[in-house]
Image (spheres, grey):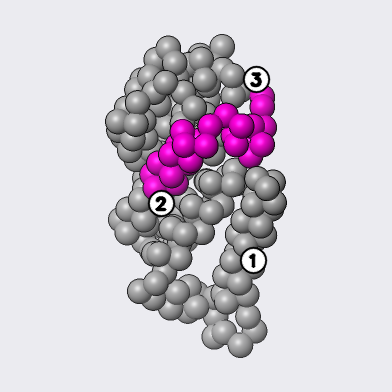
Amino acid sequence: MVKRLKYFLSALTLLLIILAIVFLFHPSAPSPAERLETLSTAPWAPFAYVFIYLLATGLGYPASLLTIVAGPLFGLWKGFIYVLVASNLTAVLCFGIARKLGTGFVDKFMGSSPLRRKLDTLLHERGFEAVFLLRLFPIHFALFNYVSGLSTVTFRDYTLGTILGKAPGMFLYVWFSVTMTSLDWRSAIIAGLALAGFLVLGQKVRARLLV
């Protein structure tokens, strides 16, 4: 049952992404840029973005691509807010599902791995600090959400650590994507260097935490 649900949601996510691509690049469109502008100003666009983000990342697909898309689609500040809302909503929902349905569900949905066991130990020992650091310097998004729900970390520490930890990295991703699509090369270089430095630092921090 769990696997069937996962396959169904994966197919639905893929279908929504294909429909979005067809909408942007269909031959009848004046240009992808004009279609993108039309899409970004539609009143339902933020809700559609949050829904697709929730589905895709909740199923374990990488969050970085959808985070980068928010910049060109909505602009710097709106894009940052929408992706922050989508990310934190997904994180809280997955946490609640894992806490409610337990280990059996997560075993079938995400499987078992050495990383999962390390995350469980780290969350048990360091609580809020572990959540904050592994949100600031992200690891597998969906896996961390579900493992957190099975751990002893409190909902308050998890939510606060997620909100505070996710914000800096998401801002850098959205800022970089906005500068790239606006062809502001000076700002793009600055944003790119900041993002690269952030990712390198994150790799070192994760390596120390998950020894």
Give amino acid for label 1. Leu
Q: Which mark is residue 114?
A: 3
Q: Earlier in the sequence, mark 3 or mark 1?
A: 1
Q: Distance of mark 3 from mark 2, alpha carbons?
A: 28 Å
Rendered-image quadrant of the C terminus: top right
Let me know if residue 69 appears in the view: no
Residue at x 45%, y 65% (from the top left corner): 48
Query: Circle 3: is it few (<14), some (14-19), or many (20+) Cα within 10 Å?
Result: few
Q: Judge the density around disc 1: few (<14), some (14-19), many (≥20) Cα neighbours within 10 Å.
A: few
Say which residue appears at 34% left-offset and 22% top-offset: 128
Relative to 38, residue 176 above or below:
above
- Amino acid type at circle 2 is Ala
The residue to which callout 1 is attached is 15
Q: Position of residue 24 (x, y in %)?
A: 56, 74
**Magenta region includes residue 115:** no
Q: CA distance from mark 1 to mark 2?
A: 19 Å
Of residues 139 and 119, which is closer to you in this image?
Answer: 119
- Label 2 sits on a secondary structure element that is helix
- Give the left or right position of residue 178, taking residue 64 as reference: left
User: Can you identify the residue that label 2 sits on?
Assistant: 86
Asked whether disc 3 touches disc 2, contact meaning CB atoms under 8 Å apart, the reply is: no
Which contiguous range is marked in magenta?
Answer: 86-114
Q: Earlier in the sequence, mark 1 or mark 2?
A: 1
